[in-house]
């Protein structure tokens, strides 16, 4: 399973009064990286819903804040699938500034029927794309 990496610059709007990234904004950086990871695989969530009635939803998310990200840092955020089943997958995400580990996250993503909001099997073509 391959690792996807994306970079972001920390802007003033991402920080608190002390110039440190506000804790909730880590979620945004992780989410944006997962979205870009999907796009890198040729998958767009709007098209997934349109074509196969599939939504991806976060069921569980755990973040370990290790060191603060600061104004003007260039963040490198990665996403990697660490396990999967027929309806869910778990990804590990890491966030670095230079060589300093800032945060890690484990995210459980489930495949949902877009109309019923009930778990459904990942369409085979999506699962194959996401795992390689």
Image: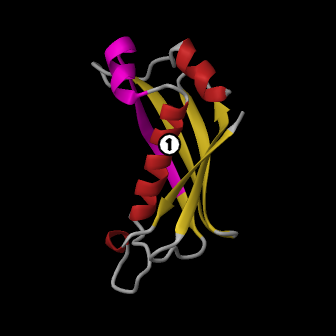
Q: Is residue 32 above or below residue 67?
A: above
Residue picked out by circle 1: 34
**Mark 1 nearby-residue class (10 Å; few <14, some 14–19, many ≥20):** many
Is residue 2 found inside the magenta-colored segment of the image? no
Q: Nearer the viewer, residue 52 or 86?
A: 52
Seen from this angle, which residue lies furthest bottom?
18
| Element class at badge 1 | helix
Q: Position of residue 34 (x, y in %)?
A: 50, 42
Q: Is residue 85 left or right of residue 43?
A: right
Q: Residue at x 49, y 59 (%)?
A: 8
Residue 113 in view in this figure = no
Q: Quadrant of residue 117?
A: top left
Q: Residue at x 37, y 75 (%)?
A: 15
Q: Locate the C terminus by quadrant.
A: top right
Is residue 55 found inside the magenta-colored segment of the image? yes
Tell me how many marks there are.
1
Q: Residue at x 51, y 73 (%)?
A: 69
Residue 24 in view in this figure = yes
Q: Position of residue 19 (x, y in %)?
A: 41, 82
Question: Which range of residues does the magenta coloring cover?
Answer: 44-62
Q: Is residue 93 above or below residue 82?
A: below
Seen from this angle, which residue lies furthest left?
115
Q: Position of residue 44 (x, y in %)?
A: 41, 28
Q: Residue at x 61, y 50 (%)?
A: 78
Q: Is residue 4 above or below residue 88?
A: below
């Amino acid at each position: 399973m391959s690792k996807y990496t994306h970079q972001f610059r920390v802007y003033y709007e991402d920080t608190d009064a002390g110039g440190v990234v506000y804790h909730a904004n880590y979620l945004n950086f992780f989410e944006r990286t997962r979205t870009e990871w999907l796009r890198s695989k040729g998958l767009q969530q709007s098209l997934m819903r349109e074509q196969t009635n599939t939504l991806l939803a976060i069921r569980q998310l755990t973040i370990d804040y290790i060191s603060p990200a600061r104004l003007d840092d260039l963040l490198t955020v990665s996403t990697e699938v660490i396990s999967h089943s027929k309806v869910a997958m778990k990804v590990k995400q890491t966030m670095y500034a230079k060589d300093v580990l800032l945060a890690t996250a484990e995210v459980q993503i489930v495949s949902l029927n877009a109309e019923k909001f009930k778990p459904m099997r990942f369409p085979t073509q999506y699962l194959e794309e996401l795992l390689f």
